[in-house]
C-alpha cells in the first residue's frame, strides 16, 4: 500500500466516523448525555488516529532508509592523521571546498588492510584496490537549486563545523541515511522532528534556518562576496 493510499484510507475512516457520529446526532433529535459522550469518544478516537498517522506512521512511510556503503569511524581517524579535519576536508587553492574525501586522502594508509575490521577489508578490497570511489551518502546535501559556499562561512564567517553539522567529527559510526521518498532529499535538511521543533542549531538546515542566521548576522547588507541580492544570495 502506498503512502497516499494509506493516508486516503485512514482519512476516509476518520470521515466515516465523523459522519456516523453526525447521523447519530441528527436521528436522536436532542442528544442525550450518552450520545454526547460517544460523540466525544469518537472525536478523540479520530483525533488519536490522525495523530498516530501524522506523527508516527506517515514519517515512517515518507522516508526510505539507506546504509552507508561502508562504516567510518571519525573519532579513531582523527587521532591518526596529522592535520585534524583538514587532512580530509580542506579548501582547494581556488577556495572551493573538497567536501567528502576521495580515495586520494585514504590511500597512503589503506593500500593494504591494516587492522582486523571487516569494514576496512571491504573498503580496501572493493574500493581502494579497484580504484572505485566510495559512493558516500551526504546527510547535508541541499537540493541542486541551492548555492552554498564553505569559504563564506568557515573562512570569512569563522564558523565552527559543529554549528551546522553537529558532532559528526567526533562520531564513531555513521548514522543511517534517510531520504524523503517524494523529493529524494536527505532528512537532515527538513529535520527529524515532524512538528518542526529544533533543539540544536544543526537539527535541520532548510531555507528558514539559513535566512534566520543571515538576518541575525546582517548578511545581505554586509555581503562583500557578490553583488547579488534577495533570493539569489542562496539560489542559482
Ligand atoms: C581520515 C579522513 C577524515 C577525517 C580526518 C575527518 N573526516 Fe569527516 N568525513 C570523512 C568521510 C570518509 C566522510 C563521509 C561520510 C559521509 O558521507 O557522511 C566524512 C564526512 C564528514 C561530514 C559529513 C557530512 C555529511 O553531511 O554527510 C562532516 C560534517 C565531517 N566529516 C566533519 C569532520 C570534522 C569536523 C572532522 C575533524 C574533527 C573530520 N570530519 C575529520 C573522513 C574524514
Ligand atoms: C593516517 C592513516 C589513515 C588514513 C589517512 C585513513 N585511515 Fe582508515 N584506518 C587506518 C588504520 C590504521 C585503521 C585500522 C584500525 C584498526 O582496525 O585497528 C583504519 C581503519 C579504517 C576502517 C575500518 C574502521 C572504521 O570503521 O572506520 C575504515 C572503513 C577506514 N579506515 C576507512 C578510511 C577512509 C575511507 C579513509 C579516507 C577518507 C581513511 N580510512 C583514511 C588509518 C588511516
Ligand atoms: C553555515 C553552515 C555550515 C558550516 C559552518 C559548515 N558546513 Fe559543511 N555543509 C553545510 C551545507 C549547507 C552543506 C551542503 C552543501 C550543498 O549541498 O551544496 C555542507 C556540506 C558539507 C560536506 C559534504 C560536501 C559534499 O557535498 O560533498 C562536508 C564533508 C562538510 N560540509 C564538512 C564541513 C566541515 C568539516 C566543516 C567545518 C570546517 C563545515 N562543513 C562547516 C553547512 C555548513
Ligand atoms: C549560523 C549562521 C549561518 C547559517 C546557518 C547559514 N549562513 Fe550563510 N552566511 C552566514 C554569514 C555570517 C555569512 C557572511 C560571511 C562573511 O562574508 O563574512 C554568510 C554568507 C553566505 C553566502 C555568501 C553571501 C555573499 O553574498 O557573500 C551564501 C551564498 C550563504 N551564506 C548561503 C547560505 C545557505 C544556502 C545556508 C543554508 C543552507 C546558509 N548560508 C546558512 C551565516 C550563516
Ligand atoms: C538564506 C538562503 C536562502 C534565501 C535568501 C532564499 N532561499 Fe529558497 N531555499 C534555500 C534552501 C537552503 C532551500 C532548500 C531547503 C528547503 O527546501 O527549505 C530553499 C528552497 C527553496 C524552494 C524549494 C525548491 C526545492 O527544490 O525544494 C523555493 C521555491 C525557494 N527556495 C524559493 C526562494 C525564493 C523565491 C527566495 C527569495 C524570496 C528564496 N528562496 C530565498 C535557501 C534560501
Image: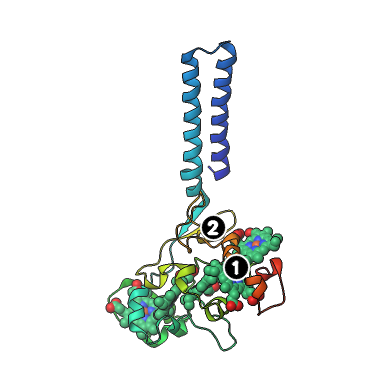
Residue at point 58%, 37% (across, down): 8
Residue furthest to the top in view is 29
Q: Is residue 231 visible?
A: yes
Identify which residue, 10 or 129, lies in the foreground. Answer: 10
Q: Secondary structure at mark 2?
A: helix
> Looking at the image, is 177 positioned above or below residue 222?
above
Q: Earlier in the sequence, mark 2 or mark 1?
A: 2
Measured in 3D between alpha carbons, the distance from the residue under mark 2 to the one under mark 1, in whole angstroms, is 18 Å
Residue named by callout 2: 190
Q: Residues within 10 Å of mark 1 (few under 14, many from 20)?
A: few
Q: Which residue carries the number 1 mark?
A: 214
Q: Residue at x 54, y 39 (%)?
A: 6
Pointer 2 residue Cβ closer than 8 Å to ligand 5: yes
Residue 124's disc number: none
State the SS at label 1: helix
Q: At which x and y percent is residue 47?
A: 50, 33
- Where's the C terminus, which quadrant? bottom right
Amino acid at each position: 500500500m502506498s503512502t497516499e493510499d494509506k493516508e486516503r484510507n485512514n482519512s476516509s475512516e476518520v470521515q466515516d466516523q465523523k459522519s456516523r457520529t453526525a447521523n447519530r446526532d441528527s436521528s436522536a433529535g436532542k442528544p442525550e448525555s450518552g450520545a454526547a459522550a460517544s460523540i466525544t469518544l469518537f472525536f478523540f478516537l479520530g483525533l488519536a488516529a490522525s495523530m498516530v498517522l501524522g506523527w508516527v506512521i506517515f514519517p515512517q512511510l515518507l522516508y526510505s532508509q539507506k546504509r552507508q556503503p561502508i562504516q567510518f569511524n571519525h573519532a579513531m581517524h582523527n587521532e591518526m592523521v596529522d592535520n585534524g579535519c583538514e587532512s580530509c576536508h580542506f579548501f582547494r587553492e581556488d577556495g572551493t571546498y573538497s567536501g567528502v574525501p576521495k580515495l586520494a586522502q585514504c590511500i597512503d594508509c589503506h593500500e593494504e588492510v591494516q587492522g582486523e575490521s571487516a569494514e576496512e577489508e571491504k573498503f580496501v578490497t572493493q574500493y581502494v584496490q579497484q580504484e572505485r570511489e566510495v559512493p558516500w551518502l551526504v546527510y547535508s546535501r541541499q537540493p541542486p537549486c541551492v548555492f552554498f559556499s564553505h569559504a563564506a562561512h568557515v573562512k570569512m564567517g569563522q564558523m565552527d563545523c559543529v554549528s551546522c553539522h553537529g558532532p559528526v567529527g567526533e562520531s564513531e559510526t555513521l548514522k543511517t541515511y534517510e531520504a524523503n521518498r517524494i523529493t529524494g532529499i536527505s532528512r537532515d535538511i527538513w529535520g527529524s522532528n515532524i512538528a518542526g521543533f529544533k533543539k540544536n542549531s544543526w537539527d535541520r538546515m532548510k531555507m528558514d534556518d539559513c535566512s534566520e542566521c543571515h538576518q541575525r548576522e546582517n548578511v545581505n547588507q554586509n555581503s562583500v562576496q557578490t553583488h547579488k541580492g534577495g533570493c539569489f544570495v542562496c539560489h542559482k
